[in-house]
């Protein structure tokens, strides 16, 4: 026969194990992905340089593997989807997360944490639905290559993407071919006029 004191000790141990399991489950449920918030979006005119920057002010938001960012155009006739291939880096508290096109770092931006395809954002406006806190619409984006959109809202600013490591950059697209050709023609014209005067 088991002594009553052992039964009480076994019962206390069982209660402790169940309570600890419940706390572990609650902690895992709290540590998720739903508190990321978009704070800046950007595209250049061709769409080959784009980014979406998110930020987490809560912590414990690294479990985003398999979650999606879905973007629709203004008429809701086109859709682009990005599926998170892995969790985010950890810890997430007071960290940015940068989704950017492959050429972003070469154009002055920091290295993206995740690569999105060129033309992922619709420059004419649309909606962004994602796993975080502030899904919603956006109006036509600036496409001058210098300005980005503070999200949500319609305020534009000089682009300043930040990645998880805290590196901040400024995307500067290469000049368009037409601009380069016009500049070269102007230089040739100016130099030929100088020679003609000499």
Image (cartoon, grey):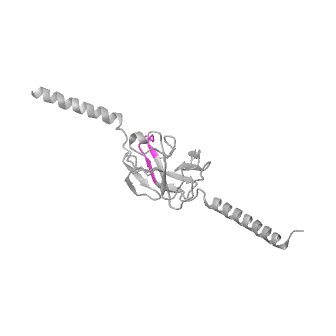
Which residue in the rendered view is the most extreme toward the right? 1
Asked whether residue 6 appears in the rendered view, the answer is yes
Q: Quadrant of the C terminus?
A: top left
Q: Quadrant of the N terminus?
A: bottom right
Which residue in the rendered view is the most extreme toward the left? 198
Residue range in magenta is 40-50
Q: Position of residue 87 (x, y in %)?
A: 58, 49
- What residue do we see at 57% from left, 58% from top? 60
Asked whether residue 124 appears in the rendered view, the answer is no
- What residue do we see at 74% from left, 65% from top? 18
Q: Let me know if residue 46 is in the magenta part.
A: yes
- What residue do we see at 10% from left, 28% from top? 197
Q: Let me know if residue 35 is in the magenta part.
A: no
Q: Is residue 68 left or right of residue 180?
A: right
Compare residues 93 and 133 and report the one nearer the observer. Answer: 93
Q: Position of residue 64 (x, y in %)?
A: 59, 51
């Amino acid at each position: 026969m088991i002594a009553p004191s052992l039964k009480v000790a076994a019962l206390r141990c069982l209660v402790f194990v169940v309570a600890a399991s419940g706390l572990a489950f609650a902690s895992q449920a709290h540590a998720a992905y739903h508190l990321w918030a978009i704070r800046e979006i950007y595209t250049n005119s061709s769409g080959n340089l784009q980014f979406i920057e998110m930020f987490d002010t809560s912590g414990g938001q690294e479990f985003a593997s398999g979650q999606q960012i879905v973007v629709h155009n203004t008429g809701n006739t086109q859709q682009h989807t990005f599926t998170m291939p892995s969790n985010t880096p950890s810890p997430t508290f007071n960290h940015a997360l940068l989704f950017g096109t492959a050429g972003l770092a070469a154009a002055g931006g920091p290295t993206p944490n995740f690569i999105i395809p060129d033309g992922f954002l619709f420059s004419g406006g649309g909606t962004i639905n994602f796993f975080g806190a502030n899904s919603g619409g956006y109006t036509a984006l600036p496409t001058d290559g210098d300005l980005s959109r503070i999200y949500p809202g319609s305020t534009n600013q000089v682009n300043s993407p930040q990645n998880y490591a805290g590196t901040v950059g400024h995307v500067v697209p290469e000049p368009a071919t037409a601009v380069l050709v016009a500049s070269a023609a102007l230089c040739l014209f100016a130099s030929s006029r100088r020679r003609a005067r000499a």
